[in-house]
Image (cartoon, grey):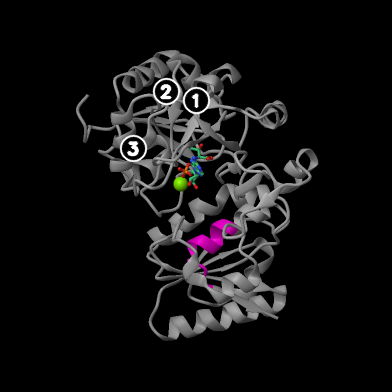
Amino acid sequence: MTYHAQTRTYRLDPHQPDPEILRIAADVLRRGGLVAFPTETVYGLGANAFDADAVARIFAAKGRPSNDPIIVHIHALAQLEQIAVAVPPLAQSLADTFWPGPLTFVLRRGERIPPNVSAGRATVAVRMPSGSVARALLQIVELPVAAPSANTFSRPSATTAAHVLHDLNGHVDVVLDGGPTTIGLESTVLDLTGAVPTILRPGGVTIEALREIVPDLQIRQSFLASDEQAGASPGMLIKHYAPRATMLVFDGERMAVLAAMRSRAEALIAAGQRVGLLIFDEDRQAFAGLAVELQVLGAVENAERIGAGLFAGLRALDAAGAQAILARAPGRIGLGAAIYDRLLRAAEGRITHVS
Ligand code: TXA
Ligand code: MG
């Protein structure tokens, strides 16, 4: 299959994806091409997980460093044995509860999965997505599909087909447009290869829900950095999910945070910068009269809605030409943990604690 393809986009009804279009996409995957498709979390950039050359094209298309491993997507539990070995019983019981859905397991890699999928590691990440287009595609292709988020490396993930095309037009063979994704945040990545199950990335399945089944669950600290860690060594946080603009996150008591954000915005505007604000419904009033680009994500207690709109909000502020984006951190319970993690990474650890 030729690469640097002419990208073909097909619109699909997510409730009733047209099998003819799915067959075209499955055929592209079988021939070693790249297909971007919606999952319930974000759009994925898929290739046949058994085909090392096809997987190499994913890295090239995204500009992704070869040391960053990729998640393999399946539609049936029986596929696990083609992908992983020594699967612990805990994976089975977690799958019973959370699959299909936004939970990824890191397991021991099986022989059929080429090393580049896992960036040379002895492990492999696997998930069974619940999004209807993803499921239908995986069923028809009958192959495990390796797929990172369908964005250029380090940019915000894509939650619409337009985002995918913005980043990857000409670098992907087919884009399946199934509308905006529902969760809008990536899956929770849970490492089951160590002595204690460890969350590597908070995501669509909450830590609280996992703790009900895995009481001894640990959280890798660099992913959900504590206030002190983030303040002490912001450079530790790898730039990820980032807008072009300089991102600044403010955390602390709401009224104090809003006052600090307003005065920072005023200072930036006075210095000639175009300022974007990523805020919650109830915060609008605090910025009345300021010449800023606004993205209002929803009520602060509505974490589902905030999560669903987060990456689109960052991309919209970029498109509006914002040079600095100021955001207020939400609480870290439930989906808030994943939202907080994405904001902190987009800001490369630049968080201002206000009290
Ligand atoms: O929701 C999602 O997970 C989306 C959709 C498309 O499924 N995918 C996604 O993929 O977010 P990506 O590549 O953007 O993020 C995958 C994360 C990265 O943090 C990567 O380091 C981690 O999973 N990961 C993948 N394989 C791993 C492995 N073998 N060991 C440790 N971490 C791994
Ligand atoms: Mg990604």
Does residue 129 lie above or below 338 as drawn? above
Residue type indicated by callout 2:
Arg
**Residue 306 as seen in the image, left or right of residue 246:** right
Mark 3 or mark 2, which is nearer to you? 2
Q: Residue at x 53, y 38 (%)?
A: 181
Which is nearer the N-term, disc 1 or disc 2?
1
Mark 3 or mark 1, which is nearer to you? 1
Q: Which residues are magenta?
A: 341-350
Residue 249 picture quarter: bottom right
Does residue 148 lie above or below 143 as drawn? below
The numbered mark at residue 278 is none
**Residue 315 as seen in the image, left or right of residue 131:** left
The residue labelled by disc 3 is: 58
Camera sees residue 339: yes
| CB atoms of marks 3 and 2 within 8 Å | no
| CB atoms of marks 1 and 2 within 8 Å | yes
Percent of width and height locating residue 333: 73, 55
The numbered mark at residue 83 is 1
Q: Disc 3 versus disc 1: distance between alpha carbons?
A: 19 Å
Position of the C terminus, as image quadrant, is bottom right
Residue nearest the viewer, comparing 319 with 130: 130
- As helix, strand or loop, the secondary structure at mark 3 comes to helix
**Label 1 packing within 10 angstroms: few (<14), some (14-19), many (20+):** many
